[in-house]
Amino acid sequence: MNKIVRAVCAAAASVLLAVAPAGAPASAQDLPKDAKYRWLSCPAGTSTTATIDSTWIEQYFEFVDVYFVHIAGTVAPCRTWMTEYEVLGLAAYSSTGAYGSPRPFPRNVPPVYTLLTAIRVYQGAHAVCVIADETTRLGCVSLSWAVVDGVARPTVTGPLAVDSPLVAVPARTDMTVPTGGPAGPGCALCPEPS
């Protein structure tokens, strides 16, 4: 009987050890608590380029009128990224300022890759751009708003020059790497950036 009890206990202990988190040191792939994204820096004489081939608006959570501008196009990074924390971004611009949202490069990025991403827009936003940093715009589209059934809804009205006065302000971008929860890039229910 003691042999059976010991065998059951040993089996239970091995299962618990297999499931319990290891006490080994963190690997290089583990996310540091204070990890920050950083913009992809380009060697002298080079730059990242992007095209915006199509756009569309999608409404999420109809009961709270949350709108996203989706961007489809291409990006040609100026160089291969060295860490998973190097990014480009999307930014939304209004008369009161601009906010950005970092977008990490895909793993094993080819020289030109397909960009398919979105950013939440708030009433009053008049442009969305793909950005290389807070002041470098790679491609932009303009927005307009119309009231439909008493609700303001955005529409993409067309391409916008990257040097347009409508997008001349820096896009303040939170470069904190999200570590779970609803916050971080693309958070649908996060409060409007101040």
Image (spheres, rainbow, N blue to C red):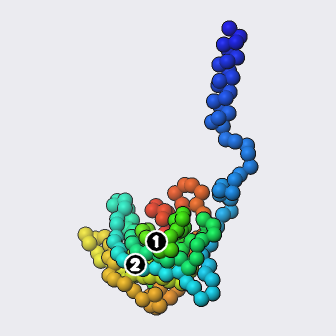
The residue depicted at 70 percent of the width and 12 percent of the height is 3
| Amino acid residing under circle 2 | Ile
Q: Position of residue 145 (x, y in %)?
A: 33, 78
- In the drawing, does residue 72 fall left or right of residue 75? left
Q: Position of residue 152 (x, y in %)?
A: 33, 73
The residue depicted at 60 percent of the width and 65 percent of the height is 84
| Amino acid residing under circle 1 | Tyr
Residue furthest out toward the front = 111
Residue furthest out toward the left = 149
Residue at mark 2: 52
* Quadrant assignment for the N terminus: top right
Q: Position of residue 78 (x, y in %)?
A: 56, 79
Dividing the picture into quarters, in which one does residue 123 lie? bottom left
- Going from N to C along the chain, the mark reached first, 2 or 1, is 2
Q: Position of residue 87 (x, y in %)?
A: 56, 71
Number of residue marks: 2
Q: Which element type, helix, strand or loop, lies under badge 2?
A: strand
Query: Comparing marks 2 and 1, which lies closer to the viewer?
Result: 1
Q: Residues within 10 Å of mark 1 (few under 14, many from 20)?
A: some
Is 113 in front, or is 11? Answer: 113
- In the drawing, does residue 160 fall left or right of residue 107? left
How far apart marks 2 and 1 lie (CA) works out to: 12 Å
Is any part of residue 169 visible from this angle? yes
Is any part of residue 120 visible from this angle? no
- As drawn, the label of residue 152 is none
Is 148 in front, or is 26? Answer: 26
Q: Residues within 10 Å of mark 2 (few under 14, many from 20)?
A: some
Residue furthest out toward the top = 1
Q: Which element type, helix, strand or loop, lies under badge 1?
A: strand
Is 49 in front, or is 183? Answer: 49
- As drawn, the label of residue 113 is 1
